[in-house]
Image: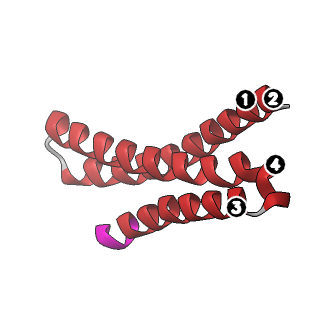
Amino acid sequence: MLFPMMGLLFMLVIGGVVAGVLSVLARPLRVWAPFIAFPPIAAGLLAFSLSWGLSLSVEALLHSERWAGISFFGGYVLGGLSGFASGLLLAVKIRRRGA
């Protein structure tokens, strides 16, 4: 069950990198390159790190697999949403600096 979830995150990161490179290569899409690349990369990396970090820390503190699983899913969702928001803010900052 965990491997497909991790595969989804890695595909999100790889897809963001590939889409970012392709948007830089296509001259009309260069304006949108930060918005295409940074949010999925940040969402995937933060969801991965937060889901595993929360799961392992809750397992070590509470010694409960049930709460570790719940915290893994919570970290997955919370990390994905906050990573997407932080990637979007980074893209806005880069876009303002370049304009």
The verdict on residue 22 being magenta is no
Measure the alpha-carbon separation of dots 4 and 2.
11 Å
Q: Earlier in the sequence, mark 4 or mark 3?
A: 3
| Location of residue 56 in the rendering, given as x and y in whole percent from the top left corner | 22, 43
For the residues carrying marks 4 and 3, which lies nearer the camera in this image?
Answer: 3
For the residues carrying marks 2 and 3, which lies nearer the camera in this image?
Answer: 3
Mark 4 residue element: helix
Mark 1 residue element: helix
- Tell me the amino acid under the disc marked 4: Val
Q: Are marks 4 and 1 in contact (CB under 8 Å)?
A: no
Q: Earlier in the sequence, mark 4 or mark 2?
A: 4
Measure the alpha-carbon separation of dots 1 and 3.
21 Å
Which residue is disc 3 drawn over? 25
Mark 3 residue element: helix
Residue at screen point 57% across, 64% down? 18
- Tell me the amino acid under the disc marked 1: Lys
Q: Nearer the viewer, residue 17 or 87?
A: 17
Residue segment shown in magenta: 1-5
Tell me if mark 2 has few (under 14), some (14-19) or many (20+) residues whose alpha carbon lies within 10 angstroms of its own: few
Q: Quadrant of residue 91?
A: top right
Tell me if mark 1 has few (under 14), some (14-19) or many (20+) residues whose alpha carbon lies within 10 angstroms of its own: few
Circle number at residue 31: 4
Q: Are marks 1 and 2 in contact (CB under 8 Å)?
A: yes
Side of 5 relative to 52 (left or right): right
Which residue is disc 1 drawn over? 93
